Amino acid sequence: MQPEFPDFPRKEFEARHDKARSLMAERGHDALLVTERLNYQYFSGHRSEQNAVDKIRSYVFILPKDDDPVLITMPFEVAQVEATTFIDRIKTTGALTGHPQFIAGVLSEMGLAKARIGAELGREQYLGISYSGLKEVMAELPDAEFADAADLILGCRVVKSRLELEYCRKAAEISAQAQRDAFRRIRPGMTENRIAQILRERLIELGAEKISLLCVVSGPVGDKGIVLLPTDRVVQKGEVVGFDVGVSWKGYWSDLARTASVGRPSGELDEFYAWMMELRHSCNMQLRTGNTPADVIGIVDEYLDRRGMKTMGVGRVGHGVGVETTEYPSLAAFEDITFEPGMVFACNPNFANHLGFINAEDNWAITGNDPDLLSAPAAESRIPVISD
């Protein structure tokens, strides 16, 4: 079947399935059972609008180790599946109940009633089926073994293809330009909610498909932490305004943050922002093939030690970006990975203090040489100024 409107060519999905099968063979899995929405989208190519809001019915992707994949979806989704995916084996049910039994039946029909089936049971994975529903599937297949396939799924998604990188780049460029434009349009005396509206409108104008988060933070930050949700707080001259935004393009996301001074910054703010950007640059330059998250953390520790500062206790200074705004792996000392070309990171050591929420986050792809900036125009090295 040749779909009319696929997000990727057939070879892209074949490469994903081949990689999954290779990892399945290493772990002794006979099949992969995928129920979480974004994993389902990643392996199938079906970006369902209904799946994101409908929890009564499970959308399922099944990848056998030596056969073609099978999709379980709703009858009203078939037209989109056929128009956007290369999946030929489509199973549907319109019933609002009995989905666990239906899933078990499909697995049995595929010869997997006694198989070792990998599922989203571990780290950073969430099922797209209820816990009791999964137990019903297991009860229907008493001779099957259900094993954790979290590391397998994470291992498939962590390195992006050329097209995935371009989609991430488009999402990042939309956000970077929209945030820069928004700073030019806002004025002291506006509320955070009005500023959020201006930013939201500009993101959509530039082509953002969806917004996963849109944070507006203004003024000094107290001991209890940051209020990321925009409120009716009025922004005053002499304060800072910060954005933290996630938007998507063709199902791929960006995660960018920017900070600006409302009016001319004080000397203290100007110096602190410039210092943070120096720290950030040093961290970004560690995003090279062969390095590890510990190398990035080491830079942060050196800078903080020289300045006599401590971390905010978040536990990491960045994370992966791709099918999700925030995804595996973390830029944290505990993360046992080595950077490879095609990995994408948002790296943002940031600070919340009496000056405000001081943050500047760009997205970078690991290459064979210097990291590739995906989010042009990049955050400015000196703090941007909002006209008063």
Image (cartoon, helix red, strand yellow):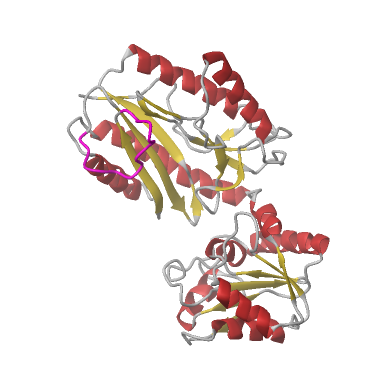
Q: Nearer the viewer, residue 187 or 27?
A: 27
Q: Is residue 1 above or below residue 187?
A: below
Q: Would residue 345 appear left or right of 33 to someone viewing this image?
A: left
State which region is magenta. 220-234
Residue lying at the far front in this picture: please name it.
223
Q: Residue at x 26, y 46 (%)?
A: 197
Q: Is residue 266 above or below residue 67?
A: above
Task: Return the x and y of residue 354 as percentages of the image width and height.
Answer: 35, 24
Q: Would residue 91 appear left or right of 180 to someone viewing this image?
A: right
Residue lying at the far left in this picture: please name it.
189
Task: Return the x and y of residue 153 as percentages of the image width and height.
Answer: 67, 58
Q: Residue at x 76, y 64 (%)?
A: 21
Residue 89, visible in the rendered structure: no
Magenta span dominant secondary structure: loop
Quadrant occupied by the N terminus: bottom right
Residue 180, visible in the rendered structure: yes
Q: Quadrant of residue 98?
A: bottom right
Q: Nearer the viewer, residue 231 or 264?
A: 231
Q: Is residue 310 above or below residue 257?
A: above
Q: Residue at x 58, y 34 (%)?
A: 372
Does 218 lie within the magenta span? no
Q: Is residue 323 above or below residue 193?
A: below
Q: Nearer the viewer, residue 27 or 4?
A: 27
Quadrant occupied by the C terminus: top left
Does 221 lie within the magenta span? yes
Q: Residue at x 61, y 37 (%)?
A: 331
State how many labels appear: 0
Task: Return the x and y of residue 213 as percentages of the image width and height.
Answer: 40, 48
Q: Would residue 50 appear left or right of 263 to someone viewing this image?
A: right
